Image: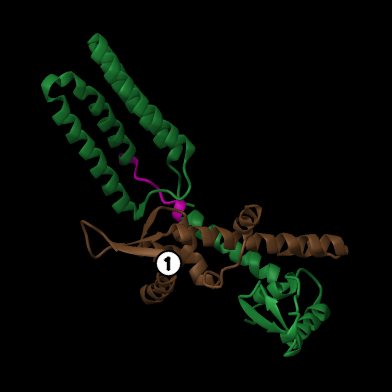
Chain colours: A green, B brown
Amino acid sequence: MDSPLALALALADPVRRPTGPSASRNDRCTLNRSVSYLPARKLLRIVAVVETTGGGPPSAARDARAALQQARQVEDAVRGIETPWWYFVLSAALFASLVLTQLLGDRTTTFMMAVGMAIVALNLMAARRAGVMGSGSHNLGFVTAVFLILVVIVGSLVWFGATGEAWTVVTAAVAAAVLMLIGGWLYRRKPS
Amino acid sequence: MIRGRQHKAEPQLDPLIHPTNRLRVCAALAAAGRVEFSLVQQAVGLSASALSKQVHALTGAGYVTQSRGVADSRRIWLRLTPAGRTAYRSHLAALQALIDASNQAGVGAGSGAEEFESTL
């Protein structure tokens, strides 16, 4: 209760004395809207201290600033964990393979599923190694790259199905790999 | 409806998150989807038992969930729940509001708050 931040809350919030029959019971005022109660005599004591101390921002603001800074430092430390370089290279190779499986004829579905499972396994392995799964803040560059890769895969499936031209599949495979590498380059960050 | 929106947008300090160590744990978890226990420990700089205690408090409030690894059950993964993420964001916003209010008060009063901040 007596932390500077809590005291600042008491000072920042409008002091509301209860009205009605219970008002005369004692002069308690609410702190941060009914969470806890702060007697007015204590509040007056706090105000007196703050008024006489002076000489800069209230300690509550200093505490808040320090807390915010610490939180941001920890967030940056976790975000700054470097994704292993081989993750993006292997992902690029796997996505290219995924596109190229279209050339396998009858075995396309089987191999496509196998490559899909390999992609999932790779993601799990990289996450396990790094100790971090998923991202709290989305990296727009990487998300865009993955979206474009999916577009390339679907596009090549449709195009190859319609025309049967093998070069479109090869081109799409190269495009998917390049997109993955660009996405990885955009995503990868050095530890802070 | 308007009242509901206002209530949602209002940043609030959460007494459960406010202690430094818990705030740091939440910060570590907010930075990613799931974070391994030892990595949180490393980021926050707490002992395993101290971190476990803080995680227990956050889990009890429904702010954090923990699960064991599928491949390696010795590894524990921690995740901030949507409620925890909201509370954490709201707490940070409230801290920021407090700082802003202090700055404004300093400017309004014509005190040497800016000079003081620059020395910090």
Label 1 element class:
loop
Residue A1, can we see it? yes
Q: Residue at x 55, y 58 (%)?
A: B89
Nearer-the-camera pick, A12 or A23: A23
Q: Quadrant of residue A109?
A: top left
View extreme (bottom): residue? A25
> Where does the image place residue A159, in percent across and percent down from the top left?
29, 14
Q: Dividing the image into 4 quarters, which one contains the C terminus of chain B? A: bottom right
The residue beneath circle 1 is B62
Nearer-the-camera pick, A163 or A172: A163
Q: Residue at x 19, y 24 (%)?
A: A101
Q: Quadrant of residue B40?
A: bottom left
Magenta span includes A77:
no
Number of numbered markers: 1
Q: Is residue B72 left or right of residue B49?
A: left
- What segment carries the magenta color? A78-86
View extreme (front): residue? A21
> Where does the image place residue B61, in percent across and percent down from the top left?
44, 70
View extreme (right): residue? B110
> Where does the image place residue A10, in percent across and percent down from the top left?
71, 75
